[in-house]
């Protein structure tokens, strides 16, 4: 099992969250807290880069959906990039 790493950076007016490792029930709280913190600090365009996600269970998908809803509630935009077919 790979540890969860999250790197936040700004890129041309977008906030990019680069996720690395496994996202599961044991560490999904870290992902949700990080994304919610970014949104609550005013991110209007949140892009989640999943290129280095090796595994994600349903709790991770739930965290992404909750983050998307939170961004939309603040009139922002949300996008996922580099999502694997799995």
Image (cartoon, rainbow, N blue to C red):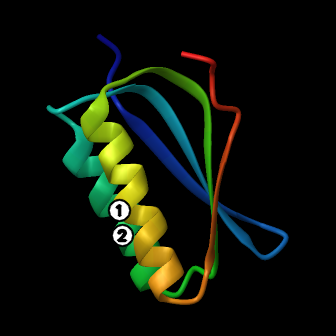
Q: Is residue 40 left or right of residue 18?
A: left
Q: Is residue 5 visible?
A: yes
Could you say whether the residue bearing mark 2 is in a helix, strand or loop? helix
Residue 31 to residue 1: above or below: below
Q: Residue furthest top?
A: 1
From the image, tell me which residue sits under label 1: 66
Which dot, 2 or 1, sits closer to the camera?
A: 1
Q: Is residue 83 left or right of residue 64?
A: right
Is disc 1 surrounded by few (<14), some (14 to 19) or many (20+) residues within 10 Å?
A: some
Q: Residue furthest left?
A: 26
Q: Residue at x 46, y 44 (%)?
A: 6
**In 3D space, how far apart are the residues under numbered discs 2 and 1 (Cα atoms)?**
9 Å
Q: Which mark is residue 44?
A: none
Labelled pair 2, 1 in contact (Cβ < 8 Å): yes
Residue 13 to residue 25: above or below: below
Q: Quadrant of the N terminus?
A: top left
From the image, tell me which residue sits under label 2: 36
Q: Is residue 9 left or right of residue 2?
A: right
Res. 59 image quadrant: top left
Could you say whether the residue bearing mark 1 is in a helix, strand or loop? helix
Question: For this rendering, which residue is in front, 56 or 21?
Answer: 56
Q: Residue at x 36, y 69 (%)?
A: 36
Q: Residue at x 41, y 56 (%)?
A: 65
């Amino acid at each position: 099992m790979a540890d969860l790493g999250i790197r936040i950076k700004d890129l041309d007016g977008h906030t990019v969250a680069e996720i690395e490792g496994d996202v599961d029930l044991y560490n999904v709280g870290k992902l949700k807290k990080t994304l919610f913190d970014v949104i609550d600090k005013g991110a209007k365009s949140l892009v989640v880069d999943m290129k280095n996600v090796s595994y994600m269970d349903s709790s991770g998908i739930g965290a992404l959906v909750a983050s998307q809803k939170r961004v939309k509630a603040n009139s922002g935009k949300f996008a996922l990039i580099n999502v694997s077919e799995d």
